[in-house]
Image (spheres, grey):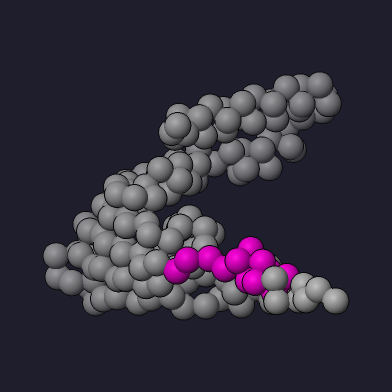
């Protein structure tokens, strides 16, 4: 009688295993609140949705901070400084650096380094506010065809923004 269980167990382990790698994130804030702290968090899963702290780092007098933490799979996270926050998309081995003027947070946030492309796209997407424009537009229409035309236009602009950050 052949023994298949160990092979199946090994295959299952290989399919679910993912590599954990350190992710360093550093940044420079202009006009950061004195004594502020950067907090990086993510949600544990899509069912419980508990926020989990990944890293915290004090911002120094020059507005700089750095943190390194283990990350095991591609996925979303958040970074917050005082009352400002931004979404992140991280993969194991990313190495992000950013610059930002706290007083104009969303319009000045810019990433460099490994993992910068998806994060710069998400920062630009916040500025474009496609979702907000769509919601605000709903009340202005009394004609379904015009509504569909505007929603399609917003979707096309969103696609064009995404393509501008798409790298082969």
Q: Give the dominant element type of the magenta stretch: helix, strand or loop.
A: helix
Looking at this view, is 136 or 115 the one in front?
115
Residue 80, image x and y in percent?
Answer: 41, 67
72 or 150: nearer the viewer: 72
Magenta range is: 8-20
The image shows residue 163 at horizontal and vertical percentages of: 50, 30
> Would you place residue 30 above or below residue 154 in this image?
below
Residue at the limit of the structure toward the front, as seen here: 1
Is 75 on the left-hand or right-hand side of 8? left
Q: Is residue 38 visible?
A: no
The image quadrant where one finds the N terminus is bottom right
At a point 27% along the width and 62% down the height, the residue shown is 26
In this view, 74 is above or below 114: below
Q: How many marks?
A: 0
Q: Depth check: 119 or 80 in front?
A: 119
Taking the magenta stretch, the answer to whether it contains residue 155 is no
The quadrant holding residue 145 is: top right
**Residue at position x 47%, y 66% in the image:** 19
Q: Is residue 162 toward the left or the right of residue 84 in the image? A: right
Q: Which image quadrant for residue 168?
A: top left
Along the horizontal axis of the image, is 126 left or right of 37?
right
């Amino acid at each position: 009688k052949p023994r298949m269980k160990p092979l199946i167990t090994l295959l299952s382990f290989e399919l679910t295993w993912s590599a954990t790698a350190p992710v360093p994130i550093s940044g420079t804030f202009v006009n950061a609140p004195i004594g502020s702290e950067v907090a990086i968090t993510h949600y544990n899963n899509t069912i419980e949705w508990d926020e989990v702290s990944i890293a915290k780092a004090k911002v120094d007098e020059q507005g700089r901070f750095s943190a390194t933490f283990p990350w095991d799979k591609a996925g979303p996270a958040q970074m917050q400084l005082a009352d400002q926050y931004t979404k992140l998309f991280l993969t194991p081995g990313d190495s992000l650096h950013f610059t930002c003027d706290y007083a104009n947070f969303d319009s000045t946030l810019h990433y460099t380094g490994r993992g910068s492309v998806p994060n710069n796209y998400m920062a630009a997407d916040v500025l474009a506010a496609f979702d907000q424009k769509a919601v605000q537009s709903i009340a202005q229409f009394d004609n379904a065809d015009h509504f569909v035309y505007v929603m399609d236009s917003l979707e096309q602009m969103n696609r064009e923004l995404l393509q501008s950050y798409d790298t082969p």
